Amino acid sequence: MVQLTRGTWAQAGTSLDFKTGNWRSTQRPVHVHAKAACHAACPAGEDQQAWFALLQEQKVQDAWVSLVHANPMPGVTGRVCPHPCETACNRTGVDGALAIHNVERWLGDEAVRLGWDYPVEPPAANAPTVAIVGAGPGGISAAYHCVRLGMKAEIFEALPEAGGLLRSAIPPTRLPRNALDGELNRILDLPGITLNTRQRLGRDLTIDGLRAQFAAVLLSPGCELPKHWSVKGAVPADLHEGLQLLRDFMDHGALPDAAKGDVIVHGGGNTAMDICRIMKRAGAKSVTLITASGLPGPGTAPDDIINVVPRELEEAQEEGIEIIDHATVSRLIMKGSRVTGVEIVSLKKEAGKDGRKRRVEFEGTERVVSVDMVVPCVGEQVEPEAFEGYLDGAYFWPDNPFGRIADRVFAIGDARGNRGTVAAAIGDGRLAAEAVAAELSGEADPFADERPVMELDGLNTAYYAGSSRARVAKLPVSERTFEAEIEGPISRSEALAEAQRCLSCGNCLACDNCWTMCPDNAVIKTTELAMDGSHYVFDYDYCKGCGLCVQECPTGYIQSVPETA
Amino acid sequence: MAPRSDTSKRLSELRMKHGRPPASPLEPKAEKAETLREAQPRFRGLESGHRACQGCGEALAARLVMESAGPDVMVANATGCLEVFSTPWPQSAWRVPWIHSLFENSAAVASGMEAAMKAKGKNTKVLSFGGDGGTYDIGFQALSGMLERHHNVLYVTYDNEAYMNTGIQRSSSTPHAATTTTSPAGKERMGKRHLKKDLLSIIAAHHIPYAASASVAYPADLQRKVRYAMGVEGPTFLVIHSPCPLGWRHDSALTVEVARRAVQCGLFPLVELERGALTNIMPIREPRPVADYLELQGRFAHLFRKDDYRAQEELDHLQALADHNIETYGLKGEGLDPMDSTGMSHVRRGGPLAGRS
Ligand SMILES: Cc1cc2nc3c(=O)[nH]c(=O)nc-3n(C[C@H](O)[C@H](O)[C@H](O)COP(=O)(O)OP(=O)(O)OC[C@H]3O[C@@H](n4cnc5c(N)ncnc54)[C@H](O)[C@@H]3O)c2cc1C
Ligand SMILES: Cc1ncc(C[n+]2csc(CCOP(=O)(O)OP(=O)(O)O)c2C)c(N)n1
Ligand code: SF4
Ligand code: SF4
Ligand code: SF4
Ligand code: SF4
Ligand SMILES: [Mg+2]
């Protein structure tokens, strides 16, 4: 007990004896590192917030290292990914999404230019070896992640070269081959990766053979078998299916003669878009895309928007491709076995009795146009030959995020029916490799990241200065060829300025707001990293739970939780 | 002007004692701090453990003032919330010499302290603190005398716009139309009938070297003003808008948001005056309607009653007062300004944006 005499005065700072923390009744502030919206949307699993944070500190190489922790091919995805990250980016609701794909591409190109080392160690001599079928983006990613996780990878590819559709189908105007090879070869050269070309599963190898010989088998064969296409049973004799046309054009640069006239392309994906543009550039009189989906716009439901890279659509329209959306080909008009015209009918996805959406054709909207060629682009499925017993219908349908379809057999990429992007194939490759690594070291499957997503309404936007998105130069339509890349690069200074626009959604940016504004001095700043990776600690001895720091944290990193938790 | 005593031996001793980082590479580093709290890279003049309400704007303001004024200061503090919540006997949240005497005489006590320091040949700066009641009302003549006698004192009034410590009675600083226990909104009146006293103009008429208004919503601006005043020889004055969640009836989490909106709508202009002349203002980038500010607070809830014809009239009256402030002080900003009411909030990785090159 303190003895108080008349002349006594209170000692400086003695209020610390009184723990106001016990005033907190219902809520307490905590640090919560939520997923940034971009990260949650990236099929490759990149944490863009993390690498933008490093760029904000001018740590360019560190940013790339952080990025390739998830995606070894930023130079490729930065060029071809439909970037759902940008659609999800919280800055969309402020003054325009971050130009994520442009900065990603720049990082990828810088790494190639400057020869930065991938963050992998050579695997041990006795490390387990994983067999990978297919050297498309899925297979390449899987091989890279196997090595990153200390295993060896042996790839078996049917074609003479690696790359999958990146090489055989995506036009160089979107993915120049030197950009592809620059990145791809650096991965294939990593210690522990062996590429065997001209090795076709089904012809030269079997799954069971691989299972017997290797620690695990990862299947990334993509989809090679065109889906059957006919219009009410009719098929033209000289049918050219879109992907095949594209592949032939990539191989020997020629298109059939009919492609000089009026062409109709039927479908709605990347293949349709690419073949439209190539035929137009090669001199077709007119090219019209008929798609059942809708064009992006305020009236179009997100699940109804045509599934292509948004800027490709824009560019195609600039180049004079006609698009008839919400429509299908309802009849072929033939002269003998040759198509001379098509009947088109409007349609839309409508909810049926069971609530599920299906396509309804609207009677009375039929119109006929004359054409010289119809090119179906309605998709492909897995070539079943090598995969009897593993396929489930046309595709693999694993019931787990890692792609496991049998003991130590995994399916990744397009061969899983609901994929369809390079980024998704890359993400699958990583997840499968992680599951294999865990399994081989006797551990359970890795935990799924179930952190909440930080949306715009969780941020305090009063603290962010306005700045507009970097604008990137594009080749004018008149200068577009079959080779020259259409979208230009961004410069170092533009990339670093763009990084400054990142709102750091869900993660502390060390702004000091909480430290500056707590009326109770209950936020403590530390030089060392605190346990949660920030530089701030709540002193719950004194925090009264007012919630002010929660409100004034720009990034949503401080959240209020019930006191009992 | 550089802080006066930066090189003084006393200041470096105090820095050592309080674990503050050295001001220059030549100054010895503080001995190793024992705890995270002691290792804070700032001076904690008003420590934790004080009994202010959750989200108290006044506690925040005083903490910010002490951080940039200390450690070589002493404080005279008028009766009021700040005095009561910081010093429940036998404890004190202050880490500087601190004297409390009466509600009405903080400036007079500070005058005496300053004279005593002068007699002892010390240049420790004296701060004088009071609430709005203790400043606009009962302590006003002591303040006026202190300014007139030109004491080297920084007077800070924590303006929470009512007598909060005794239960939310109106003061001459309570804004027009606010409900308090002595100006209740009801059949007779829509809250306080009279206007908020324009104290800053009265202070300016004393012709003192420096007088300014600040807000807890703009800590960097507030602390710059404190540092500036600390460097001035002679009387200086600062009024800090300090929301009171209890008296204004808003959520304790919204203290800074409420303060920010007060500035952004023009009802609480942030200005600086030297020798009575307006020398600086914080421009408002895009003035917000006063309703944005008022709607967050229960003390103005009666202005949003759809069934009372007087409500709209009073809202319009408050809007006119805000517009008048914007007009009088020329607060309307022109284009983007990093130091305006929007730019001053901006942060980037590692801290505030304003003032960084
Ligand atoms: C024209 C076109 C444009 C596209 N544009 C884009 C775009 O802009 N953005 C985007 O994200 N996605 C795009 N895509 C989709 C993207 O290319 C695929 O999602 C991605 O390539 C899938 O990768 P994968 O590894 O699963 O398969 P693939 O890339 O198809 O690779 C499979 C590989 O496996 C090999 N293989 C197959 N069977 C066997 C076997 N039995 N034995 C051994 N090897 C075998 C194949 O030769 C091939 O190299 C486009 C697709 C097309 C067709
Ligand atoms: C002469 C005198 N009259 C009345 C009081 C009672 N009293 C104590 S604090 C206070 C109000 C203080 O209001 P303000 O100065 O605005 O400070 P706040 O509590 O709002 O911070 C009053 C009326 C007193 N202490 N002395
Ligand atoms: S891979 Fe695609 S979704 Fe992921 S960051 Fe790159 S552009 Fe965005
Ligand atoms: S602002 Fe940054 S962290 Fe937030 S969603 Fe956009 S890219 Fe991701
Ligand atoms: S501002 Fe301070 S007292 Fe209020 S909740 Fe945050 S840490 Fe606690
Ligand atoms: S307020 Fe700023 S420093 Fe504090 S946790 Fe949030 S982002 Fe980090
Ligand atoms: Mg008061």
Image (cartoon, coloured by chain):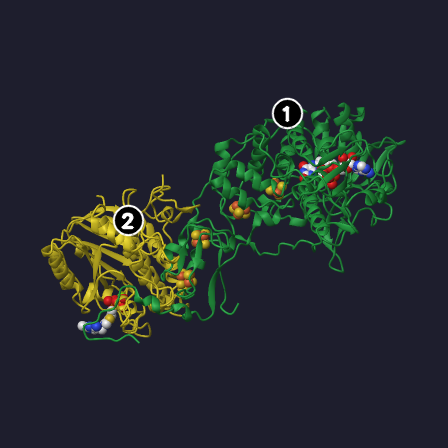
Q: Determine whether, in the image, residue A178 is placed left or right of residue B352.
A: right
Question: Viewed as shown, does residue B242 lie left or right of B351?
Answer: left
Residue B325 appears in the rendering:
no
Residue behind mark 1: A484
Q: Is residue A157 left or right of residue A313?
A: right
The answer to which image quadrant residue A139 occupies is top right
Residue type beneath disc 2: Arg
- The extreme right residue here reads A336
Q: Is residue A46 above or below residue A12?
A: above
Tell me which chain the residue with mark 2 is part of: B
Q: Which mark is residue B224?
A: 2
Q: Is residue A403 visible?
A: yes
Task: Output the letter for the chain in green.
Answer: A
Dividing the image into four quarters, tell me where ligand 1 lies: top right
Tag 2's secondary structure? helix
**Quadrant where the C terminus of chain B lies?**
top left
Place of residue A469 in the rendered image (x, y in percent of width and height, measured from the top left): 50, 39
